[in-house]
Image (cartoon, grey):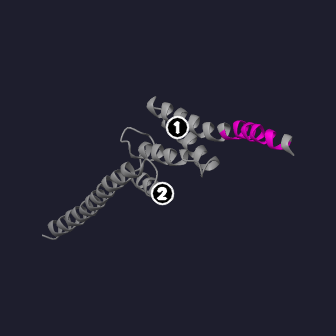
Amino acid sequence: MMRALRALPVLLLLAACSAAPVSFRAPARLIAQADDLADQGQAQEASHVYERVLREYPADPAAASALYGLGRLQASPASPLRSYRAAHATFSRLLTEYPQSRWEREARAWRAVLADLLAREDESARLRAQIERLRRTDLDLERRH
């Protein structure tokens, strides 16, 4: 009995060393890889790595970082993945699924800016459509006279 108790701490240490680092370090390494790809202008490749983290490690804190990185790619005007609506949805998802993450403040700021931008884009589209209708009406009136 005493021998088993002495072996218990060693067994616990071995179990912790063999399992925890792999599950913890792998997502962090993937996030670093995706961040590097994004910095190098390889947005598509970076997004695939971020999405892999989200798919394979949803309960890991790195998943919040993956959403943040993905949202930034979607919000970047220079990115081929630029979609302000998708970025807004990604930052909203980050706030919903990981409300206590280290990215909470930044995600709220991004979401607010994107909501304002989207509202302005919608208003601009509405005004362009209204101008086009008025232009057609004006042309119709000129033809009648």
Q: Amino acid at mark 2?
A: Arg
Residue pointed to by mark 1: 46
Q: Position of residue 100 (x, y in %)?
A: 46, 54
Q: Is residue 135 left or right of residue 22?
A: left
Query: Magenta segment range?
Result: 4-20
Residue at position x 15%, y 66% in the image: 142
Q: Position of residue 38 (x, y in %)?
A: 47, 34
Q: Is residue 94 above or below residue 16?
A: below
Residue at position x 78%, y 39% in the image: 11
Residue pointed to by mark 2: 93
Residue closer to the observer: 71 or 11: 11
**In terms of secondary structure, where does tag 2 sit?**
helix
Q: Amino acid at mark 1?
A: Ala
> What main secondary structure does the magenta stretch of the protein show?
helix
**Separation of marks 2 and 1 at Cα, in angstroms:** 19 Å
Q: Are marks 2 and 1 in contact (CB under 8 Å)?
A: no
